[in-house]
Amino acid sequence: MTPSNQHDEKKPFPWHLVFFLGPGLLIYVVFSVYPLLDTLVLSLYNEQQGQSSFVGLQNFITLVTDDTWSQAFWNALGNNFKFFAIHMLVQNPIGLLLAVLLSAPKLRLSGTYRTLIFMPTMLSVVIIGFVWQLLLSPIWGISEDFLYNIGLGQYFDAWLGKEGSALITLAFISVWQFVGIPMMLIYATLLNIPDDIVDASVVDGANSFQTFWHIKLPLILPTIAMVSILTFVANFNAFELIYAVKGALAGPNFSTDLMGTFFYRTFFGFQLQQGSASMGAAVATLMFLIILVGVMLFLFFIQRRIQRFQF
């Protein structure tokens, strides 16, 4: 058989790929792709008296302009951006700092420190919320006595009970629980930096800070970018902590309301608010679009600059 005939001969169908990838792909389509598409379709309909009618984008227009819906929607969206900003400005820098400290070769018991810092991440969000609610309670919590013992008692307040501080307090609780994730991701990247590059900078006379700033930081920028994307996606899907501590009403006076709790009340209903599947689907669709646009903008404007900076 000549080479040309071998080239023209059809290759057998890769059935082994179907065998290995088929079950996983099927599960992904059934439990991820289909619900997403069904939600997008449902957001274009309106249900009245058991009858569904196609309304196009009317649900979205109602959500952002109607007096009944718009105030709650814009309040939840604004709170979500505040929640995300606190994580970006507090959680990720602390995670970076902890990763740098734990990657120091002379640090003793670094494995123990990593375990202790990462341990809250493995706990249930419901347990974390309940425990911190007890700790910060002005009635039976221990935080007031603790602050008085260290001379900071005048700063104690009912942080979870005031509109101006409840969201910030919950954000810091979330930071405390999940700071181990950016720490471990950045720590793993720091360990993968070749020792030859670091040793060369030391030979050239660079101190520890200069080595980190000019050598290590550019090499871990892609990981920091990935951590930022994960933070954005996770924060705009946040629900459990708010619900565990403040309930579906996200009190006081909806000051801790996020898109997740707003979606919950809209779709399932709560107390005197009647649930609406079509309006809930519209809220979920907007959450999906916000996350999608945010990730795309990040990849387009920031990721390209990081790659240009590296190469």
Image (cartoon, rainbow, N blue to C red):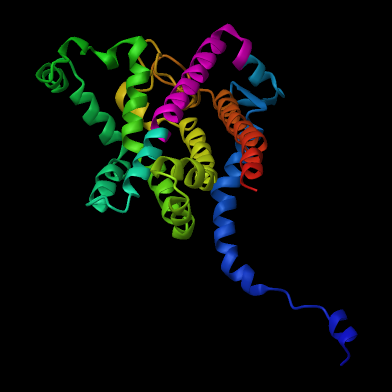
Query: Between residues 97 and 19, which one lies in front from this camera angle?
Result: 97
The verdict on residue 73 being magenta is: yes
Q: Measured from the top left, where is residue 296 in percent x and y?
A: 65, 36
Q: Is residue 296 above or below residue 275?
A: below
Instruction: Point out the residue furthest to the bottom here.
Output: 1
Q: Measured from the top left, where is residue 24 in percent x and y?
A: 55, 60
Query: Between residues 172 and 100, which one lies in front from this camera angle?
Result: 100
**Residue lying at 22% horizontally and 12% vertically, measured from the top left:** 155
User: Does the rendering let one see residue 264?
Assistant: no
Q: Measured from the top left, where is residue 46 in percent x and y?
A: 64, 23
Q: Is residue 17 above or below residue 59?
A: below
Q: Is residue 7 left or right of residue 52?
A: right
* Range shown magenta: 63-92
Question: Looking at the rendering, which quadrant does residue 166 occupy?
Answer: top left
**Number of labelled discs?**
0
Q: Measured from the top left, where is residue 144 in percent x and y?
A: 15, 17
Q: Is residue 273 above or below residue 223?
A: above
**Residue lying at 54% horizontally and 26% vertically, measured from the top left:** 280
Q: Is residue 78 left or right of residue 7?
A: left
Report the quarter where the N terminus lies: bottom right
The verdict on residue 151 being magenta is: no
Question: Looking at the rendering, which quadrant does residue 8 occupy?
Answer: bottom right
Q: Is residue 182 above or below residue 152?
A: below
User: Does the rendering let one see residue 225?
Assistant: yes
Query: Between residues 297 and 167, which one lies in front from this camera angle?
Result: 297
Q: Is residue 283 left or right of residue 269?
A: right
Question: Looking at the rendering, which quadrant does residue 254 occupy?
Answer: top left
**Residue lying at 64% horizontally and 44% vertically, measured from the top left:** 307
**Residue lying at 87% horizontally and 87% vertically, measured from the top left:** 3
